[in-house]
Amino acid sequence: MTSTADKQRGTTVTTVRPRRSLKHKLIWLADHIRNEWQIYLMLLPTVIWMIVFLYKPMYGLQIAFKDYSIFRGVAASPWVGWEHFENLFSNDQFIRAVWNTVKISALNLLFGFPAPIILALMFNEVLHATYKRTAQTIVYLPHFISTVIIAGIVIQAFSPTAGIVNTVLGWFDIEPIYFLTKPEWFRPIFVGTGIWQEAGFGSIVFLAAIAGVNPSLYESAVVDGASRWQMMWKITIPSILPTIIISSFGVQTWHRGALCH
């Protein structure tokens, strides 16, 4: 602290507080938790979830360096060092698998990332409330369908005998195409299925961002004679651009999920 006499002399005296011991810090922490227990109680489910699903599974990462046996368990399985990685990198299919992953990720980035943005912009232009809510519900539903069921739907839809795709092609006298047995059709079907399943649910974030745009901007644009197309390009898209940029950093998470599917 600084006294009056010290101020008159133009000098400053700094009081150094003694460092608190670990015991005092623990007492302070206990008092703080006791006073704010409601906040920590609300935080507890998230902490438990992170421990169980994010940190506990990391124990199993050591399997990559062990000759894992289901009968011995993780701890009792013998260590083999880098043997599994050497087998992976020396495999003839390794480069092909990496190259296919890069191609699929590029296609997802090129077509999958813009899909929910375009869908949100389309929903924003729908003025009929009932139709808008119905359409949103329909495009959200695939996100909640199991991946196993999605795979079954794809197999049935592209079946050469009873699939709806080949049935429509038959109306135009086009011979049935065995989509699922031709390598050149795998990537379009894989990427398209991922977009169909996740684009609707992904548009929720961008619809929320659009809802936060200041309505006075649209009102001013209408007074100036701007069309809906011009308002979308000059107001809506620039306003949600920060959300688009932030979402672009997490787009690879969606890609990894799609590859796992």
Image (cartoon, rainbow, N blue to C red):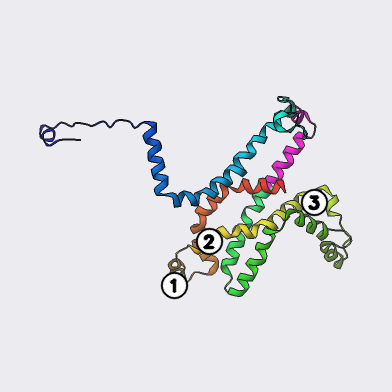
Residue 118 sits inside the magenta stretch: no
Q: Position of residue 222 (x, y in %)?
A: 47, 71
Q: Which residue is mark 1?
A: 223
Q: Nearer the viewer, residue 64 or 211?
A: 64
Amino acid on which disc 1 is placed: Val
Q: Which residue is mark 2?
A: 208
Q: Position of residue 110 (x, y in %)?
A: 65, 50
Q: Position of residue 44 (x, y in %)?
A: 52, 48
Label 2: element kind: helix
Kindly indicate the quadrant of the structure image that contains residue 142.
bottom right
User: Where does the magenta region start and end?
Assistant: 86-106
Where is 115 relative to 227, above or below?
Answer: above
- Left or right relative to 99: residue 115: left
Q: Which badge, 2 or 1, comes first in the chain's sequence? A: 2
Distance from the alpha carbon under mark 3 to that under mark 2: 35 Å
Of tags 3 and 2, the one toward the viewer is 2
**What's the mark number on residue 185?**
3
Q: Is disc 3 in contact with disc 2, using a CB cutoff of under 8 Å?
A: no
- Left or right relative to 47: residue 94: right
Distance from the alpha carbon under mark 1 to that under mark 3: 50 Å
Q: Which badge, 1 or 3, comes first in the chain's sequence? A: 3
Where is 169 relative to 19, above or below?
Answer: below
**The N terminus sits in image quarter:** top left
